[in-house]
Image (tube, rainbow, N blue to C red):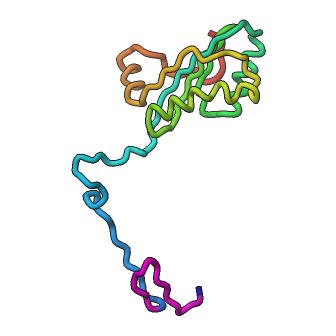
Amino acid sequence: MRPGTAVSRGGGTSRAAGEERTLTSVSVSDTYESEAAEEPRDLPRLWHITLSVSGPETPLKEVRRGLQQLAHDHPFLLTSRYASDHAEIRYWEEARDLHDAAAVALRLWGEHRRTAGLPPWEIVGLEVIDRQTYHQRIAEGYGPPPATPVGVHPF
């Protein structure tokens, strides 16, 4: 646009060159039709994920190498425990709600099986809990112990 020209968008009035545009806000009551409507809950939250996989026996060296590669490719993984026929992966996921966190977790093993060299195992368990529940369980002395040491370890 050339300096000094005014533009009308959507049938609004034109502004003179250099004239400031005033910003206005919209209140929540203007946005929603009724007071019963809830505000959007699109803010991401942290979810603690425990993914359990199992399948045919695989040499421990291969299982460990695959889990280490997965942890290298995805540094958000806290800890992995493994045996020759099963493994458990624990990590924090940021997602809008439990459904989104679970969907991402359920895709993790299959989507990275080839690139990380993971065994052809299937997902046999999934736990998704919010941060508050995780910390409450720890404080009450039940639930999984905190993920220390971080890394890939045998059962």
The reply to whether residue 83 is in sight is no
Which of 48/24 is in front?
24
Apparent side of residue 131 relative to residue 31 in the rendered image (left or right): right
Which of 128/121 is in front?
121
Q: Which residues are magenta?
A: 2-16
Quick check: 48 above or below 96? above
Q: Position of residue 114 (x, y in %)?
A: 76, 26
Q: Quadrant of residue 119?
A: top right
Furthest residue toward left: 35
Q: Quadrant of residue 61?
A: top right
Query: Which secondary structure is most common in the magenta stretch?
Result: loop
The reply to whether residue 11 is in sight is yes
Taking the magenta stretch, the answer to whether it contains residue 12 is yes
Furthest residue toward front: 11
Apparent side of residue 74 relative to residue 94 in the rendered image (left or right): right
- Residue at image location 47% in from the left, 89% down from the top: 18
Q: On the rendered image, what quadrant is the C terminus found in? A: top right
Q: Position of residue 124 (x, y in %)?
A: 57, 14
Q: Position of residue 152 (x, y in %)?
A: 66, 20
- Residue at image location 72% in from the left, 17% down from the top: 120
